[in-house]
Amino acid sequence: MIVPSYACPPRARRRRARRGLRRRSQRERGVALIIAITAIAILSVVLADLHESTGTAFAIAAQQRDQLRAEYMARSGLNLTRLLIARRNDVKNAVAPYYQALMRTRQTPDLPVWAVADQVLKPFCDYEAARALNTGVDFGGADGLGDTNARCEIVAFGENAKINVNAPLHFAGDQARRSIAMQLFSMMGGYQSPSPYDPLFQQRDRDGQFTSRQDIVAALIDWWDYDQDRTVFDPGRAEVSTSGSEDDIYRRLPDPYDAKNAPFDSLEELRLVRGIGDDFWATFVDPRPDEPQSRIVTIYGSGRVNINEAPPEVLLARVCSFIETDPLCSDATEASKFVQLLRTARAMIPLPLFPNKAAFLDFIQGRGGASGLYPMLRGFLGDESPLLFRPATIPAAVANEVGDALVASARIIAIEVTGLSGCRERDESGECVGGWRGRTRLRTVVNFHERWTPPPPNAGSMPGLGIFHYYRVE
């Protein structure tokens, strides 16, 4: 029997109402819990996405900031180096008395201030490292210097310290071709028997062809000379001639092309020339990519080699292009002695060793009197030392040519500056050990020759900071 609610006593109705409210409250609490869990899950996803987006945006912003800072550090290092080179005469005048007293000479060569740009410009490129040197100079009051968490590294050298494979400025016609051919053939060990480079020319090149030294010499010359005849180099007679077409070898390739018949515009263009593959590149062109000053060849030189900056191998190749039958050039042992002796002398005396071309020619021939480099080294090592090379003999008929092929100064300078910013981790001494977030490298070649004039119809003269022949940002 169902009792109507109005028939229930008030106390029972209140009890039933409370039970209903309690059941409804329990149902509502369950729904609220589900809603809260769902909301927390959604908020967690949103928060994680926000955190990831914010972190990524921050990392990108930091990377872009450090990359921009690195680029401007590299630009600053480049401009400061150009300024230092432009003031090289002031440096030379200040150092001249000390150099003349040390080297016992009345002449002072063109000092390669660019070679020490990284040390001289240290306060601008690496402020903390400059302070740690304890030079006695207080950089604290200098405006614009301070800890920027960035640095720049500078490498600069004269391009005429390399063997020029491009059309030379000071030679023309057959004289230019013969000069380049003799240098290249000597550089590749062609006048030595046996030569340590022989295995390089006894295997197939990248195109599946056997390419001799003479083939590479001819191909390099044919690339920049203006005719379409193939150059033939006879090292025995030291002559060049022409025969056939220079484009035949390139037209037989799967992707044919012709020789340029114009000067090289960049060093990388050498890879288009017959026989210049990775092995040749790593041996003669750029043996140590991380050390650009170790490069052996150039396309920016005038044809004259800098006696104070050129590596011993380059100097030997240039001289041997005139006296190829001398034991210094034909005997690999004597050539090795020359290279090691000159390299050791430069390590002992970190200054230009030869005030002029005559001093270098005296060294090659073992002359120079008491103040000459060869007699000085002979007195230090002993007359019978196996480290001394046999002095060369330069015939009078070619003495003027040898002298004309050498120079004691540089006007076209390669400047490579690397800007670094945003060190990830430093050790206790403050040295960066975790790498840099931003890195920019500027590869440039700058002309400082005072005789330069712009091509017609332009007018003007060489600006104080030089002009760029090559500019690349990496």
Image (cartoon, rainbow, N blue to C red):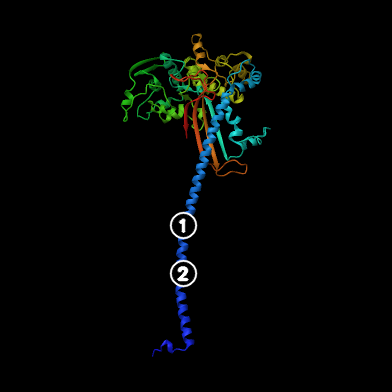
Q: Is residue 262 above or below residue 141?
A: above
Please state which of residues 180 and 146 is positioned toward the viewer in this rendering: 146
Rendered location of residue 226, percent (x, y) = 37, 18
> Residue tagged by mark 2?
32
Q: Amino acid at mark 1?
A: Val
- Looking at the image, residue 20 sits to the left or right of residue 355; the answer is left
- Looking at the image, residue 385 sits to the left or right of residue 324; the answer is right
Q: Amino acid at mark 2?
A: Ala
Please state which of residues 77 and 159 is positioned toward the viewer in this rendering: 77
Looking at the rendered image, the quarter that the N terminus falls into is: bottom left
Instruction: Kindly give the residue lying farthest to the bottom in the view shown.
Output: 1
Task: For mark 2, give the secondary structure.
Answer: helix
> Residue tagged by mark 1?
46
Q: Is residue 452 above or below residue 427?
A: above
- Looking at the image, residue 473 sits to the left or right of residue 342; the answer is left
Q: At x 66% / y 35%, what residue is drawn?
A: 141
Q: At x 58% / y 40%, what residue is drawn?
A: 148
The mark total stands at: 2
Q: Is residue 192 visible?
A: no
Task: For mark 1, give the secondary structure.
Answer: helix
Q: Is residue 243 visible?
A: yes
Rendered location of residue 424, percent (x, y) = 55, 44
- Looking at the image, residue 216 sits to the left or right of residue 138; the answer is left
